[in-house]
Image: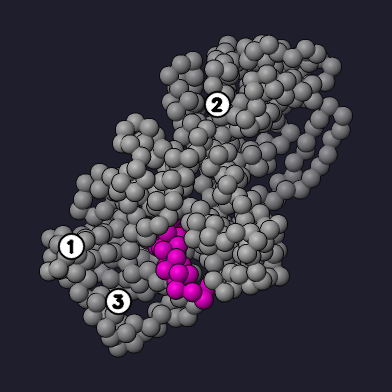
Amino acid sequence: MAETIYICIVSATYTTFMSIKLVGREKEQEILRKVLDTPEAEFVAVLGRRRVGKTFLVRSVYGALIRFDITGLQNATTKKQLKNFAVHLRSAFGEISPKETPEDWLDAFQFLTECLDKTLDPAVKSVVFLDELPWLAGRKSGFLDGLSYFWNSWAVKKNVVVVVCGSAASWMIRHVVYNKGGLHNRITRRIHLMPFNLYETDAYLRSRNVALNPFQVVQLYMAMGGIPHYLKEVDGSKSAIQNIEQICFSGTGLLHDEFLKLYPSLFDDATHHIEIIKALGGKWKGLTRQEIIDATGLPDGGNFSRYLEELVHSGFISAFNTFGKKQKDALYRLTDEYSLFYLHFIQPLHQNTYERDTWQNMSQTSHFKSWSGYAFENICLKHIEQIKKALGISGIFSTSGSYYHKGNSDQKGVQIDLLIDRKDSVINLFEIKFSAEPYTLTQSYAHDLLQKIASFKALTGTRKQVFLNMLTTQGLQPNTHSIGVVHAAFSLDVLFEKA
């Protein structure tokens, strides 16, 4: 349920009230509010990819409790970052702030402690908010030393909450969460803010007076994912196809070139990250680590592992265990909806070739059919809890993954879109289909499904009960061919449930 929070923003010269609707994020809000009630200082790290709403969440929950905040400047020198810090000090504390620019980050944080000491009410927990930390902490800048000094020598003894945010999630994990220096083991709470799921996406759109049915919402989600900054561009008077046309294919659309900014904003040298993204974008079944190396030509080693780790932590790719196989055989998939959409539909078109109804025409092609199947499958893999709820097995421990067995001249290959392996000796196999109409099972397809189940049992040697389920956008049309083959069928509506 959307919640209205009234925020008082206080500056040196004026006070303004504004109403902001914060949708979803219940667990994250609870964490942020809980630290206000503890008797000790708190150090909170908020991680999450670009445009996911980290800053909005922190400002919405804390509002006027934020006594000082600063956002790092992208690609700026340490000198410019320090000058920016001085400007924010003067804005927050007025005449009591030092008039000179700090020489280094130790000076900067010393200035901050002096200003806070003069203004803080010890009975009220105040917030210091440092946003886009990776931009502030350039190489050899000394920022982390200054932050360590600030926390260990001052903040830890005060009634404060220090919140640090960063879009480069893996950088935040390596340098802050698992810092080996003065910040070692100092983080008291960690929030990894994920994109909206379908339930939250629908709620967010409705909070902006966009009332679309689930099929329309899923089409939007397949193109741009659950990123609030992207979704705010949706026009409630237009269909999903019309919105995608405007947002992704017009020269003024937010997402027609977002891809070119996205990865460089997160990684110092994004070239290799983009190579991996492109390799995964071309393979529907996903790729193993070795297959990614073969496809990109990147050397195996520590740097390659770091690229993968950074892309996983930032939410662009996901690793899925293959049933019955070792961890090293995990399949990596490109699961960032926008990146996949960009590579397959926006990038191939030069801006000058955009025509009216570009997406309408593309959505009639065979390539759209194969992409939509994969994109919808990715969405289902992100909504496992909702699928388990629909199956009635939320309370049963289970693991999920996929299954792939390459065929040969003697045996046909087997691919399972989604597999849920349950502790109650049951395995649910899912066939996932994207269709504008209720899906109808043909006799030949029903035969193929029975063969798939038989092959899966034979190849894995499982003794568990195997149920075949179907999850389709518009549901399954029951007929004689589905009886005895499909144990239970679900429509996309189950994905919109609150987990």
Residue drawn at point x = 19 percent, y = 69 percent: 412
Q: Secondary structure at mark 3?
A: loop
Residue drawn at point x = 63 percent, y = 64 percent: 353
Please name the amino acid that badge 3 sits on: Val
User: Which residues make up the magenta segment?
Assistant: 363-387
- Name the residue tied to disc 3: 486
- Name the residue tied to disc 1: 464
Residue drawn at point x = 64 percent, y = 51 percent: 229
Q: CA distance from mark 1 to mark 3?
A: 17 Å
Could you tell me residue 120's position as x and y percent? 72, 20
Could you tell me residue 363's position as x and y percent? 53, 72
Left or right for 252, reference 134? right
- Name the residue tied to disc 2: 43
Could you tell me residue 84's position as x and y percent? 72, 24
Residue drawn at point x = 34 percent, y = 49 percent: 295
Q: Secondary structure at mark 2?
A: strand
- Which picture quadrant has residue 463? bottom left
Considering only vertical position in the picture, is 491 above or below 16?
A: below
